[in-house]
Image: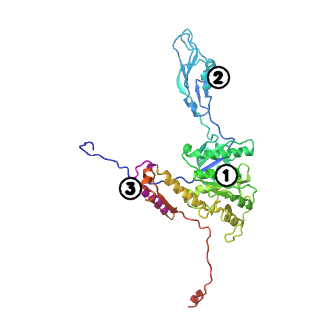
Amino acid sequence: MTQFLHGVEVIEVDSGSRSIQTVKTAVIGLVGTAPDSAGATAASLQKGSAVINDGLLFTAIEAGTGGHAISVTFVDPGTANAELGVSVVGQKITVHLATDGDSALSSTASDVQAVIVANTDAAALVNVKALGTGEGIVVNDAEAYLSGGRDEPFPLNTPVAVAGSQQQVNQLGKAGTLYKAFDDIFDQTGALVIVVRVAEGSSDAETQANIIQGMRVLLSAQTQTGYKPRILIAPEFSQYDAVAAEMQTQAARLRAVAYFDCEQGASYTDAIKRQRKYDKRCELMWPWVTVFDEDLAKNVNRPLSARAAGLRARIDAEKGAWWSKSNQEIYGIVGTAQAVDWTLDDPNTTANMLNENHVSTVIQQNGFRFWGNRNCSDDRQWMFEQTVRTADMINDSIQLNHLWAVDRNLTKTYFDEVCEGVNDYLRQLKAEGAIYDGKCSADPDLNSSATVKQGLAYFDFDFEPPFPAEHIIFRSRLNGDYIEEVFN
């Protein structure tokens, strides 16, 4: 029964289709080493002054922002002949200052330092140093908290989001592989990168094991950073089969793609043989590229995968995930580590043989261009990278945008609303050129009374993404009829 009301009320009806927002497709997942990465900074607090020798500097034992919870208070007891003492409650340190027979304060900075050091609880929280000679008398001072602490910017085996910030990257230091990989990526675009720093091992095998573990850490990136990596790279390590195999595994779990390099000295035939080991979520690249290193003031060879990831992020931002990154210019390179011969109409060039065998490469034509559409799969339906990524984008977007639909009552209106929302999204993608077309429906045979009673709801949707114009054929012929037109 409706409650009596002599007036007007508004009832909000929570029904109708929900719009679907496309997931971020250009998030790069990067794993590597950076042994000189900046560490955490301890919080600190100064009371008094070195000028009059009553200053004390307190520094948190544990570095990081956790030290900001520590406070220090100096208390005047207000009585004669009080003894100097320290009490600790939680992370609050209180120093009860000493007095003489006239109730005047008599504790020097050195005295306070000594009593804090001698207190087990206080010494576990802070280090303390007397400033100047330490002979000045300490006066009562209100509670103050330590400040200025900073957590480690790139803790080991922890996903950290870097949104195109070179200043943030500088904290990695230049040693190891991560700083150079960011340089490769940022040459293409200011991408969003989820980076996992791992420790350098005592051997190459141990470092590879750390890289593999770092790849697994990317699975927690969504929870810890709010972003799911979609393009996985491990420059200077992905040429190793053990690392590449793990990248393939995590790419499948994340609905991502993984970019692999070959050994720097590998031949193009070595690359073709290696390609056969991997699937539709993997793209193999050959050769390495040559770039100018400003620190060394000379050209050096770099793996292609990081620049390819940056290029992929740039194309996603400018054109969309459904566009191929092939035939797009790669910025910041001066050559390739090994010669790649290519002409537009010759099937017997190195570049064409690589592409035919699902290996991507670099050509030089009005700049250096990424050349290759195919992943490592021989399944003709899934052999183009953009097809896989478009399907991932649509599947993830529809899945993640239907939390609202879970646990709702299964009614005709419910099925209509879900189908309408998905169809609106597919129409939007069609208008953007992301798909040729698509449709969502609820199959009445699948959604029988038996399945509905189990709380199951089935929806079918289909779509077809566009395919790249990989092979263009012009048919040329002579036409003598044009001669008659001249004389007529």
Q: Which residue is mark 3?
A: 412
Q: Which residue is mark 1?
A: 245
> What is the image's colouring?
rainbow
Q: Would you say the residues marked 2 and 1 are in contact, meaning their CB atoms lie under 8 Å apart? A: no
Q: Circle 1 — which element?
A: helix
Report the side of 462 relative to 9 (left or right). Answer: right
Q: Position of residue 70 (x, y in %)?
A: 56, 27
Picture quadrant where residue 484 is located? bottom right
- Relative to residue 211, is residue 353 depicted above or below? below
Pointer 2 or 1: first along the chain: 2
Q: Is residue 375 magenta?
A: no
Q: Circle 2 — which element?
A: loop
Q: Position of residue 419 (x, y in %)?
A: 43, 57
- In this view, the residue farthest toward the bottom is 488
Q: Residue at x 59, y 65 (%)?
A: 468
User: Can residue 241 be seen by looking at this rendering?
Assistant: yes
Q: Which residue is mark 2?
A: 132
Q: Residue at x 54, y 58 (%)?
A: 391
Q: Amino acid at mark 2?
A: Gly
Picture quadrant where residue 329 is located? bottom right
**Cα gap from disc 2 to disc 1, whole angstroms:** 60 Å
Residue extent of the magenta highlight: 403-432
Question: Which class describes the residues within 10 Å of circle 1: few (<14), some (14-19), or many (20+)?
Answer: some
